[in-house]
Image: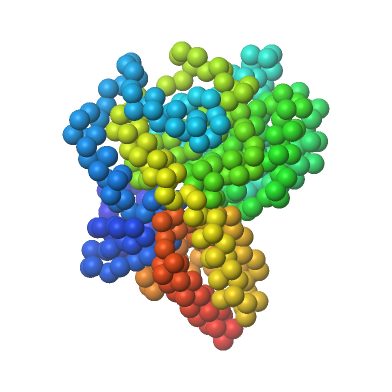
Amino acid sequence: MSQYLIPTYARQPLAFVRGEGVWLYDEAGHKYMDAISGIGVCNLGHCHPAVTRTLADQAGQLMHTSNLYRIPSQEALAQRLCEVSGMQSVFFSNSGAEANEAAIKIARLFGQRKGVSRPTVVVMEGSFHGRTMATLSATANAKVQEGFAPLLEGFVRVPFNDLDAVRALGDNANVVAVLVEPVQGEGGINVPASDYLPGLRALCDQHDWLLMLDEIQSGNGRTGDYFACVGDKVTPDVLTTAKGLGNGFPIGACLVAGKADGVFGPGNHGSTYGGNPLGCATALTVVNTLTDDVVAGVAEKGAWLKHAFTDAFADLPMIKEIRQRGLMLGIQLDRPCAELVNRAREAGLLINVTAGSVVRLLPPLVINQTEMQHLVETLSQVIHDFANEQEVA
Ligand SMILES: Cc1ncc(COP(=O)(O)O)c(C=O)c1O
């Protein structure tokens, strides 16, 4: 590990030099299946040829001009994102946390303009929204917040997937918005009841609150619709996304509609790099490739994997539950299982363990049937070996 890097990450002891589709190759030429897609980023797989081509062409033509001028590819990407989401306009950022920063600022401005002097955003237990001061304050993870007091005020936290808890805030005059992930990712692939988002939409309408959906992980085809809210037939007031939007190029977006459209005006927000020609041309190819060829197959692939894992683990009481929507899968164990990451890697499989005891899988959406079979067989072997050793111990 390099002494020249600030050690904010507990890195695994390997480096990759090449990627293609669902596969990564390390310095020694070993091949690994990437079942976490660079944490939900490479939805089209590594080095998708259409994305690489656009990126290279655009880099040779024009990378950056700044938002002092019109940027045609930014306008085209905004239009395409609005078409696939039902939203009305877009602010571009460079990451997920920054997209959520924009959302939180919109909520505050929306509140201030209607005379709420201490605007408050409802956030959820189990949530993850990023690592900047505002987004870590919105995040429900003591480890993420530890040592960074004073946190930003203006958040109130309730249990996830609990409409009554949100309803109970109806007489809190400071509440101006609800910020929620349609499926919690870092929190352990928590899939709410099908009436949860529609129920939140109704409560937000009733109380004149903004419904703000963090689709940074669940967006860009991951759940089987371009955005999870499209599948739930809910149009939020604010929708944030990043990760899969650039398939590896850093770009984020904060989309608005309804009550949130028109809240930001000139001077309210900005970003030097946000929406630059290189990122927008690349992301436009990503969105078009996802919608043309890929998203339609995601629900079926996810259902197949859930079924196959359910069969593979039928004999293991250690497996408590398999949660899934599209190609977001969480295998809930009854005990801490962080060591599965190393064990899987030694078997040539890259996975992630989140919330201590959940194996999180976010494979590239382009994964094919043979590769899915390989994923199930490899992970099944790894978890069975783990279970056998635990029994002996
Ligand atoms: C739901 C959600 N929101 C926000 C973020 C933060 O995104 P970024 O790391 O690009 O700032 C993440 C990243 O994991 C996420 O999963």
Q: Is residue 222 above or below residue 367?
A: above
Q: Is residue 313 above or below residue 186?
A: below
Q: Quadrant of the C terminus?
A: bottom right
Taking the view exactly as shown, the residue that stands out farthest to the left is 60
Taking the view exactly as shown, the residue that stands out farthest to the bottom is 392
Q: Can residue 384 be seen?
A: yes
The quarter of the picture where residue 189 lies is bottom right
Residue 112, position in %: x, y? 64, 16
Residue 167, position in %: x, y? 79, 36
Which residue: 53% across, 25% down? 88
Which residue: 50% across, 24% down? 89
Here the colouring is rainbow
Which residue: 39% across, 28% down? 76
Residue 224, position in %: x, y? 54, 50
Q: For this rendering, which residue is in front, 125 or 210?
A: 210
Taking the image as shown, residue 378 lies to the left or right of residue 13, namely right
The quarter of the picture where residue 51 lies is top left
Q: Can residue 355 be seen?
A: no
Q: For this rendering, which residue is in front, 299 or 95?
A: 299
Q: For this rendering, which residue is in front, 333 or 34?
A: 34
Residue 139, position in %: x, y? 58, 42
Which residue: 32% across, 16% down? 69
Q: Is residue 322 above or below residue 165?
A: below
Q: How many marks?
A: 0
Taking the image as shown, residue 59 lies to the left or right of residue 225, namely left
Taking the image as shown, residue 37 lies to the left or right of residue 61, namely right
Q: Quadrant of the N terminus?
A: bottom left
Q: Is residue 165 above or below residue 296?
A: above
